[in-house]
Image (cartoon, rainbow, N blue to C red):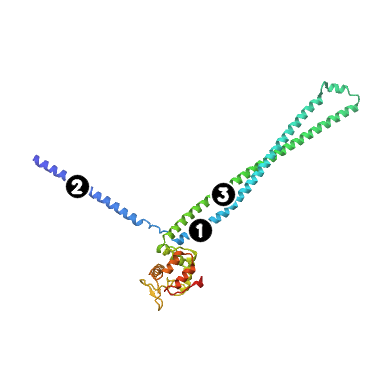
Amino acid sequence: MIHLEHTTHIQTRHSASSLARRLIAAAAGLVVAVAAALMLAAAVAAPPAAAAPSLFQLQKEAKRARAEMATLQEDLQAVGQKVVDAQARLDEVNQRLNLTRRELRRAEQDLDLQRAILAKRAAILYKTGDFDWLDILSSIQSLADIDTLRSLQRAIADQDRKTENEAQVLAREARRLEREVEKEHEEAVVAEREVQQQKIELDQKLAERTAILQDVTKRIKKILASGGLGAALAMSKNGQFTQLSWAKALLVAMRFPVTADNVAAVTAWEMAEGGHWYNTAYYNPLNTTQSMPGATIFNSVGVKAYTSWKQGLEATMITLKNGYYGGILDALKRGNDSEAVARAVGASPWGTGDFSRLL
């Protein structure tokens, strides 16, 4: 009986342990499933990587940066003149302030001197040396002497008051001028500070645009330096080419120098052949007969109409490199003589003839 109970207890404990392991395993599986689902959702929700800007977009951005820099240069020049004007005005106000302060000191000194004179004269009127008013009165012999003395005293007192008043007026005027000039000086300082701040902000903006332009220029040069078909196609504007831009694209695709002579030569060659822009040999400016997938025959000679600019460039490159046009390739590699390119085309089996007249 005891053995049976012990066995039952072991079996019960074993069953509980097994159930716990199964629950733990299920929970772990659920965690893994949830994590995988979250990772999948994040991958689906993640936005696609932005495509690298095309050469045309970079050139457009560079043009915009140059235009902004030109405007900033004009603004900076105008602000620079304002700075000069503000500094000149501040210098003038400083000179006036110094002059006004000197005049104020002089007026105050004159006022102090006049007051000292008045005080001294008042003392003299009441006592001169060993004589006082009693001595003066005892020496008066007639009423005329009294009137004369009173008139003299009155005249002296009036003149003293007048002089003191004038000195006070001058001192007040000097103080008023000092306050006005000090206010003007404060305004000039504020104006000069504001203009200097404008100059600092414009300098910062110009430095930012310069850094942007340098970065864009570096990326443009990197694209052009890499050469190849991808760099050439990146030169399109909204996926399209002009005769001029296609000439540059062909040179970049074949890694030839993009010089003025080379561009002029290829553009004139396009005009002489008339492909794409003057006939329906689409995407085939030089009227090559190179077969490509999906291309159609344009005329009895076998000139092709291609399906895209990429295919047309590839066909033109294949043709130029097929071993029959070494003279053209050599002239384009030198890149310094458009007429040499025209003569090389005329001497080749391409069929265009010498198009020097178009240069």
* Residue 326 visible in the displayed image: yes
Q: Which mark is residue 199?
A: 3
Q: How far is disc 1 from disc 2 in space, using C-alphas?
A: 71 Å
Question: Could you tell me residue 67's position as x and y percent?
Answer: 53, 58
Which residue is rendered at x = 83% and y = 31% of the image? 154
Which picture quadrant has residue 155? top right
Q: Nearer the viewer, residue 269 or 322?
A: 322
Which residue is rendered at x = 72% and y = 34% of the image? 108
Which residue is rendered at x = 12% and y = 43% of the image? 8
Q: Nearer the viewer, residue 286 or 90?
A: 286
- Circle 1 packing at 10 Å, graded few (<14), some (14-19), many (20+), is some
Marks 3, 2: nearer the viewer? 3
Vertical order, 313 against 134 (above or below):
below
In what quadrant of the picture does the N terminus appear? top left
Vertical order, 302 against 157 (above or below):
below
Question: Could you tell me residue 143's position as x and y percent?
Answer: 90, 27
Q: How far is disc 3 from disc 2 in space, using C-alphas?
A: 78 Å
Q: Which residue is mark 2?
A: 19
* Dot 1 amino acid type: Arg
Q: How far is disc 1 from disc 3 in space, using C-alphas?
A: 22 Å
Question: Could you tell me residue 203's position as x and y percent?
Answer: 54, 50
- Circle 2 packing at 10 Å, graded few (<14), some (14-19), many (20+), is few
* Dot 3 amino acid type: Lys
User: Is 251 displayed left or right of 36 in the figure?
Assistant: right
Element type at mark 3: helix
Mark closer to the chain start, 1 or 3: 1
Mark closer to the chain start, 1 or 2: 2
Q: Nearer the viewer, residue 54 or 189?
A: 54
- Circle 3 packing at 10 Å, graded few (<14), some (14-19), many (20+), is many
Q: Which residue is mark 1?
A: 64
Marks 1, 2: nearer the viewer? 1
Count of marks overlaid on the render: 3
